[in-house]
Image: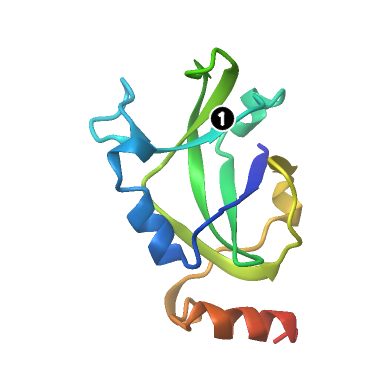
Amino acid sequence: MLNLIKLVVGVSSVEELAERQKDPHNTRQHPQHSARLPVVHTRTFPRQSEEILQGGSLYRVISGLIQCRQQVLDLQTETRADGTQGTLILLSPEIIRVEPRAMRPFQGWRYLKPADAPPDLSGPQSSNLPPHLQKELTLLGL
């Protein structure tokens, strides 16, 4: 299994990401799922796609922190309006919060080994602190 990690541009919270994913322009129908699935557009198709599709997730960097993940359900190629090839990453609708971890900006997506991925938050640990407080606490190492 292998994960991906990608920055979310123009979003400042997990809640805002969830709202954005409800927009029909950000979803696709998939033959194996009754509901429309959230989708991420990217340029490059992952060479290690088989490993990703064995239970891998897309981890999301929001406001400089890895804050959540969604399971990758499928990877598809697409032809864009300008004729160039692109990739669609189809995701599970369930957004799972993870232990916030600082991450510097980068272009596109990167592979993320399971050993390097932040653990999921659950129960009382998954506080609803405002993102700016979460970021400050993480940067302070708390």
Q: Is residue 135 above or below residue 40?
A: below
Give the side of residue 68 with respect to residue 30, left or right: right
List x then y, in percent, for residue 38. 39, 40
Q: Which residue is mark 1?
A: 53
For residue 101, what is the image quadrant?
bottom right
List x then y, in percent, for residue 131. 52, 77
Q: Residue at x 68, y 40 (%)?
A: 108
Q: Residue at x 73, y 63 (%)?
A: 103
Q: Residue furthest left?
A: 34
List x then y, in percent, for residue 61. 61, 58
Q: Secondary structure at mark 1?
A: loop
Q: Amino acid at mark 1?
A: Leu
Q: Is residue 22 above or below residue 119?
A: above
Image quarter (top left, top right, bottom left or bottom right) of the C terminus: bottom right
Total count of labels: 1
List x then y, in percent, for residue 47. 72, 23
Give the side of residue 45 with respect to residue 96, left or right: right
Image quarter (top left, top right, bottom left or bottom right) of the N terminus: top right
Give the class, few, some or many, for how many residues have Cα within 10 Å of label 1's Cα (few <14, many ≥20). Answer: some
Q: Is residue 129 above or below residue 72?
A: below
